[in-house]
Amino acid sequence: MASIKELRQRIRSVGSIKQITRAMEMVATTKLRRFQDRAVGSRPYAQEIAGLVGRLAGVLGEDVEGLPLFRRGPGLATLAVVVSSDRGLCGPYNSNVFRALEAWRAARPEADVRYLVYGRKAFQYMLRRGYRVERVVQDPPLEKIDYRSAAIGARVLVREFLSGAYADVWLLSTRFESMARYVPQFTQFLPIEAAALGAEKSAGAGDVILEPDPRTIFEQLVPRYLEVRAYNALLESLTSEYASRRLAMKNATDAATDMIKALRGVYNRKRQEGITRDLLDIVGGVEALK
Protein backbone atom coordinates (compact mmCIF):
# COMPACT_ATOMS: atom_id res chain seq x y z
CA MET A 1 0.00 0.00 0.00
CA ALA A 2 1.37 3.40 -1.02
CA SER A 3 2.15 5.91 1.69
CA ILE A 4 0.52 9.33 1.99
CA LYS A 5 3.65 10.95 0.54
CA GLU A 6 3.65 8.62 -2.47
CA LEU A 7 -0.07 9.24 -3.06
CA ARG A 8 0.51 12.98 -2.96
CA GLN A 9 3.29 12.63 -5.55
CA ARG A 10 1.06 10.49 -7.79
CA ILE A 11 -1.74 13.04 -7.62
CA ARG A 12 0.68 15.80 -8.64
CA SER A 13 2.10 13.68 -11.49
CA VAL A 14 -1.33 12.79 -12.88
CA GLY A 15 -2.36 16.44 -12.52
CA SER A 16 0.63 17.50 -14.63
CA ILE A 17 -0.25 14.94 -17.29
CA LYS A 18 -3.84 16.19 -17.26
CA GLN A 19 -2.66 19.74 -17.91
CA ILE A 20 -0.61 18.56 -20.89
CA THR A 21 -3.42 16.47 -22.42
CA ARG A 22 -5.89 19.31 -21.84
CA ALA A 23 -3.60 21.76 -23.63
CA MET A 24 -3.11 19.32 -26.52
CA GLU A 25 -6.88 18.84 -26.74
CA MET A 26 -7.40 22.60 -27.02
CA VAL A 27 -4.71 22.91 -29.72
CA ALA A 28 -6.19 19.98 -31.66
CA THR A 29 -9.67 21.51 -31.40
CA THR A 30 -8.46 24.84 -32.77
CA LYS A 31 -6.64 23.25 -35.71
CA LEU A 32 -9.53 20.87 -36.35
CA ARG A 33 -11.92 23.76 -36.83
CA ARG A 34 -9.59 25.38 -39.33
CA PHE A 35 -8.99 22.23 -41.37
CA GLN A 36 -12.64 21.17 -41.15
CA ASP A 37 -13.78 24.47 -42.65
CA ARG A 38 -11.33 24.03 -45.52
CA ALA A 39 -12.27 20.37 -46.10
CA VAL A 40 -16.01 20.98 -46.03
CA GLY A 41 -15.59 24.09 -48.17
CA SER A 42 -13.65 22.19 -50.85
CA ARG A 43 -16.25 19.44 -51.26
CA PRO A 44 -18.78 21.35 -53.39
CA TYR A 45 -16.02 22.41 -55.79
CA ALA A 46 -14.71 18.83 -56.00
CA GLN A 47 -18.21 17.49 -56.67
CA GLU A 48 -18.94 20.17 -59.27
CA ILE A 49 -15.74 19.63 -61.24
CA ALA A 50 -16.27 15.84 -61.12
CA GLY A 51 -19.79 16.35 -62.48
CA LEU A 52 -18.52 18.66 -65.21
CA VAL A 53 -15.86 16.16 -66.28
CA GLY A 54 -18.51 13.43 -66.26
CA ARG A 55 -20.85 15.44 -68.48
CA LEU A 56 -18.06 16.16 -70.96
CA ALA A 57 -17.10 12.47 -70.93
CA GLY A 58 -20.72 11.70 -71.81
CA VAL A 59 -20.50 14.12 -74.74
CA LEU A 60 -17.30 12.50 -76.04
CA GLY A 61 -18.70 8.99 -75.57
CA GLU A 62 -16.40 6.13 -76.55
CA ASP A 63 -13.60 8.53 -77.51
CA VAL A 64 -12.81 8.93 -73.78
CA GLU A 65 -11.63 5.32 -73.50
CA GLY A 66 -8.82 6.03 -75.96
CA LEU A 67 -7.29 8.81 -73.86
CA PRO A 68 -4.09 7.86 -71.94
CA LEU A 69 -5.46 8.77 -68.50
CA PHE A 70 -8.60 6.64 -69.03
CA ARG A 71 -6.92 3.32 -69.84
CA ARG A 72 -4.59 1.08 -67.88
CA GLY A 73 -0.91 1.79 -68.20
CA PRO A 74 1.48 -0.63 -69.91
CA GLY A 75 3.48 -1.27 -66.74
CA LEU A 76 3.09 -4.27 -64.43
CA ALA A 77 3.50 -2.51 -61.08
CA THR A 78 0.93 -0.63 -59.01
CA LEU A 79 1.67 2.68 -57.32
CA ALA A 80 -0.14 3.24 -54.01
CA VAL A 81 -0.24 6.66 -52.36
CA VAL A 82 -0.68 6.30 -48.58
CA VAL A 83 -1.58 9.28 -46.39
CA SER A 84 -0.83 9.00 -42.65
CA SER A 85 0.26 11.45 -39.94
CA ASP A 86 3.68 12.88 -39.13
CA ARG A 87 3.10 12.58 -35.37
CA GLY A 88 1.49 10.14 -32.97
CA LEU A 89 -0.97 10.71 -30.11
CA CYS A 90 -3.89 10.69 -32.53
CA GLY A 91 -5.77 7.63 -31.29
CA PRO A 92 -6.54 4.86 -33.79
CA TYR A 93 -6.09 7.09 -36.85
CA ASN A 94 -2.85 5.54 -38.13
CA SER A 95 -3.71 1.99 -37.09
CA ASN A 96 -6.96 2.24 -39.08
CA VAL A 97 -5.00 3.41 -42.13
CA PHE A 98 -2.56 0.50 -41.79
CA ARG A 99 -5.39 -1.98 -41.30
CA ALA A 100 -6.99 -0.76 -44.54
CA LEU A 101 -3.61 -1.02 -46.27
CA GLU A 102 -3.11 -4.63 -45.18
CA ALA A 103 -6.63 -5.57 -46.28
CA TRP A 104 -5.99 -4.00 -49.69
CA ARG A 105 -2.67 -5.85 -50.00
CA ALA A 106 -4.29 -9.14 -48.99
CA ALA A 107 -6.66 -8.81 -51.93
CA ARG A 108 -3.62 -8.52 -54.27
CA PRO A 109 -1.13 -11.07 -52.97
CA GLU A 110 0.76 -11.33 -56.26
CA ALA A 111 0.81 -7.63 -57.17
CA ASP A 112 4.04 -5.66 -57.41
CA VAL A 113 3.06 -2.66 -55.26
CA ARG A 114 5.25 0.39 -54.77
CA TYR A 115 4.45 3.28 -52.48
CA LEU A 116 4.47 7.05 -52.35
CA VAL A 117 4.02 8.13 -48.74
CA TYR A 118 2.69 11.21 -46.97
CA GLY A 119 3.51 11.17 -43.26
CA ARG A 120 6.39 9.73 -41.23
CA LYS A 121 4.23 7.15 -39.46
CA ALA A 122 3.43 5.31 -42.69
CA PHE A 123 7.05 5.46 -43.78
CA GLN A 124 8.22 3.94 -40.48
CA TYR A 125 5.52 1.26 -40.71
CA MET A 126 6.52 0.28 -44.25
CA LEU A 127 10.24 0.43 -43.50
CA ARG A 128 9.83 -2.14 -40.71
CA ARG A 129 7.98 -4.48 -43.06
CA GLY A 130 10.27 -4.09 -46.03
CA TYR A 131 7.72 -2.51 -48.38
CA ARG A 132 9.11 -0.78 -51.44
CA VAL A 133 8.77 2.97 -50.85
CA GLU A 134 9.56 4.99 -53.96
CA ARG A 135 9.16 8.44 -52.43
CA VAL A 136 8.34 10.12 -49.10
CA VAL A 137 6.78 13.57 -49.32
CA GLN A 138 8.20 15.67 -46.46
CA ASP A 139 8.31 19.18 -47.90
CA PRO A 140 6.01 20.81 -47.16
CA PRO A 141 4.81 18.94 -44.04
CA LEU A 142 1.31 17.57 -44.38
CA GLU A 143 0.00 20.11 -41.86
CA LYS A 144 1.11 22.95 -44.15
CA ILE A 145 -0.18 21.44 -47.38
CA ASP A 146 -1.95 23.81 -49.76
CA TYR A 147 -3.55 23.52 -53.18
CA ARG A 148 -0.30 24.30 -54.98
CA SER A 149 1.58 21.50 -53.19
CA ALA A 150 -1.25 19.04 -53.77
CA ALA A 151 -1.37 20.01 -57.46
CA ILE A 152 2.37 19.34 -57.80
CA GLY A 153 1.85 15.92 -56.18
CA ALA A 154 -0.99 15.13 -58.59
CA ARG A 155 1.18 16.09 -61.57
CA VAL A 156 3.93 13.79 -60.29
CA LEU A 157 1.44 10.90 -60.14
CA VAL A 158 0.25 11.64 -63.68
CA ARG A 159 3.83 11.82 -64.95
CA GLU A 160 4.72 8.51 -63.30
CA PHE A 161 1.61 6.88 -64.73
CA LEU A 162 2.22 8.18 -68.26
CA SER A 163 5.87 7.08 -68.13
CA GLY A 164 4.68 3.51 -68.57
CA ALA A 165 6.09 2.22 -65.28
CA TYR A 166 2.71 1.53 -63.69
CA ALA A 167 -0.56 -0.11 -64.66
CA ASP A 168 -2.60 1.91 -62.14
CA VAL A 169 -2.36 4.35 -59.25
CA TRP A 170 -4.34 3.99 -56.01
CA LEU A 171 -4.91 6.49 -53.21
CA LEU A 172 -5.36 5.51 -49.54
CA SER A 173 -6.73 8.46 -47.59
CA THR A 174 -9.19 8.98 -44.75
CA ARG A 175 -12.60 10.44 -45.48
CA PHE A 176 -13.87 12.83 -42.81
CA GLU A 177 -17.55 12.13 -42.17
CA SER A 178 -18.09 13.63 -38.70
CA MET A 179 -16.23 14.62 -35.53
CA ALA A 180 -16.34 11.01 -34.38
CA ARG A 181 -16.27 9.12 -37.69
CA TYR A 182 -13.44 9.05 -40.25
CA VAL A 183 -13.11 6.16 -42.63
CA PRO A 184 -9.92 5.04 -44.44
CA GLN A 185 -10.63 4.25 -48.09
CA PHE A 186 -8.72 3.08 -51.15
CA THR A 187 -9.80 4.76 -54.37
CA GLN A 188 -8.41 4.34 -57.87
CA PHE A 189 -6.71 7.58 -58.88
CA LEU A 190 -5.49 6.49 -62.31
CA PRO A 191 -6.67 5.41 -64.79
CA ILE A 192 -9.79 7.54 -64.38
CA GLU A 193 -12.95 5.46 -64.51
CA ALA A 194 -15.52 7.12 -66.75
CA ALA A 195 -18.31 5.19 -65.02
CA ALA A 196 -17.30 6.67 -61.65
CA LEU A 197 -17.80 10.15 -63.13
CA GLY A 198 -21.33 9.30 -64.21
CA ALA A 199 -20.41 9.69 -67.88
CA GLU A 200 -23.02 7.22 -69.09
CA LYS A 201 -25.77 9.35 -67.50
CA SER A 202 -24.66 12.46 -69.35
CA ALA A 203 -25.11 11.32 -72.94
CA GLY A 204 -27.91 13.84 -73.44
CA ALA A 205 -25.49 16.70 -72.94
CA GLY A 206 -24.51 16.50 -76.61
CA ASP A 207 -27.18 19.12 -77.44
CA VAL A 208 -25.21 21.76 -75.55
CA ILE A 209 -23.09 24.12 -77.70
CA LEU A 210 -19.54 24.31 -76.34
CA GLU A 211 -16.76 26.68 -77.30
CA PRO A 212 -14.02 25.60 -77.80
CA ASP A 213 -14.86 22.03 -78.74
CA PRO A 214 -15.70 19.49 -75.97
CA ARG A 215 -12.46 17.54 -76.38
CA THR A 216 -10.28 20.63 -75.84
CA ILE A 217 -12.26 21.63 -72.75
CA PHE A 218 -12.12 18.06 -71.47
CA GLU A 219 -8.34 17.76 -71.88
CA GLN A 220 -7.85 21.06 -70.05
CA LEU A 221 -10.24 20.13 -67.25
CA VAL A 222 -9.05 16.60 -66.44
CA PRO A 223 -5.70 17.73 -64.88
CA ARG A 224 -7.63 20.21 -62.69
CA TYR A 225 -9.98 17.41 -61.67
CA LEU A 226 -7.07 15.22 -60.55
CA GLU A 227 -5.47 18.10 -58.65
CA VAL A 228 -8.72 18.78 -56.80
CA ARG A 229 -9.09 15.10 -55.94
CA ALA A 230 -5.58 14.98 -54.50
CA TYR A 231 -6.04 18.20 -52.53
CA ASN A 232 -9.40 17.14 -51.13
CA ALA A 233 -8.04 13.72 -50.08
CA LEU A 234 -5.07 15.26 -48.25
CA LEU A 235 -7.27 17.86 -46.58
CA GLU A 236 -9.83 15.33 -45.37
CA SER A 237 -7.06 13.05 -44.05
CA LEU A 238 -5.55 15.95 -42.12
CA THR A 239 -8.97 16.87 -40.71
CA SER A 240 -9.53 13.26 -39.67
CA GLU A 241 -6.14 13.17 -37.96
CA TYR A 242 -6.94 16.18 -35.78
CA ALA A 243 -10.44 14.93 -35.03
CA SER A 244 -8.91 11.67 -33.84
CA ARG A 245 -6.23 13.51 -31.85
CA ARG A 246 -8.80 15.76 -30.18
CA LEU A 247 -10.88 12.74 -29.14
CA ALA A 248 -7.80 10.86 -27.89
CA MET A 249 -6.64 13.81 -25.80
CA LYS A 250 -10.16 14.34 -24.42
CA ASN A 251 -10.30 10.67 -23.37
CA ALA A 252 -6.85 10.99 -21.77
CA THR A 253 -7.94 14.11 -19.88
CA ASP A 254 -11.10 12.40 -18.65
CA ALA A 255 -9.09 9.34 -17.59
CA ALA A 256 -6.67 11.58 -15.67
CA THR A 257 -9.60 13.28 -13.93
CA ASP A 258 -11.02 9.90 -12.87
CA MET A 259 -7.59 8.73 -11.69
CA ILE A 260 -7.06 11.87 -9.60
CA LYS A 261 -10.50 11.40 -8.04
CA ALA A 262 -9.68 7.78 -7.15
CA LEU A 263 -6.25 8.70 -5.76
CA ARG A 264 -7.73 11.52 -3.69
CA GLY A 265 -10.23 9.07 -2.23
CA VAL A 266 -7.43 6.70 -1.18
CA TYR A 267 -5.35 9.64 0.07
CA ASN A 268 -8.18 11.00 2.22
CA ARG A 269 -8.92 7.56 3.70
CA LYS A 270 -5.27 6.99 4.61
CA ARG A 271 -5.01 10.52 6.02
CA GLN A 272 -8.14 9.95 8.11
CA GLU A 273 -6.78 6.61 9.29
CA GLY A 274 -3.56 8.34 10.39
CA ILE A 275 -5.49 11.02 12.28
CA THR A 276 -7.68 8.41 13.97
CA ARG A 277 -4.63 6.37 14.93
CA ASP A 278 -2.95 9.44 16.46
CA LEU A 279 -6.09 10.25 18.46
CA LEU A 280 -6.28 6.70 19.75
CA ASP A 281 -2.63 6.90 20.84
CA ILE A 282 -3.33 10.15 22.70
CA VAL A 283 -6.44 8.74 24.41
CA GLY A 284 -4.58 5.57 25.30
CA GLY A 285 -1.74 7.59 26.81
CA VAL A 286 -4.15 9.68 28.88
CA GLU A 287 -5.89 6.59 30.14
CA ALA A 288 -2.54 5.03 31.08
CA LEU A 289 -1.62 8.09 33.17
CA LYS A 290 -4.83 7.95 35.26
Image (tube, helix red, strand yellow):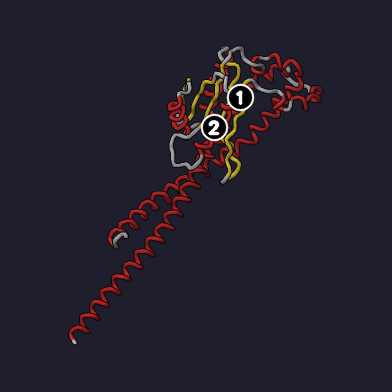
Q: x, y percentage for residue 2?
A: 31, 59
Q: Which quarter of the figure is the N terminus placed in?
A: bottom left
- Distance CA(mark 2)–CA(mark 1): 13 Å
Residue at 64% over, 17% down: 69
Q: Nearer the viewer, mark 2 or mark 1?
A: 1
Residue toward you, 287 or 254: 287
- Residue marked by disc 2: 234
Q: Residue furthest bottom?
A: 290
Q: Is residue 59 left or right of residue 169?
A: right
Q: Amino acid at mark 1?
A: Phe
Whether tag 2 and tag 1 are in contact, CB under 8 A, the answer is no
> Which mark identifies residue 265?
none
Q: Sequence-wise, which precedes: disc 2 or disc 1?
A: 1
- Residue marked by disc 1: 189
Q: Amino acid at mark 2?
A: Leu
Q: Residue furthest front?
A: 288
Q: Quadrant of residue 113?
A: top right
Residue at 37% over, 55% down: 15
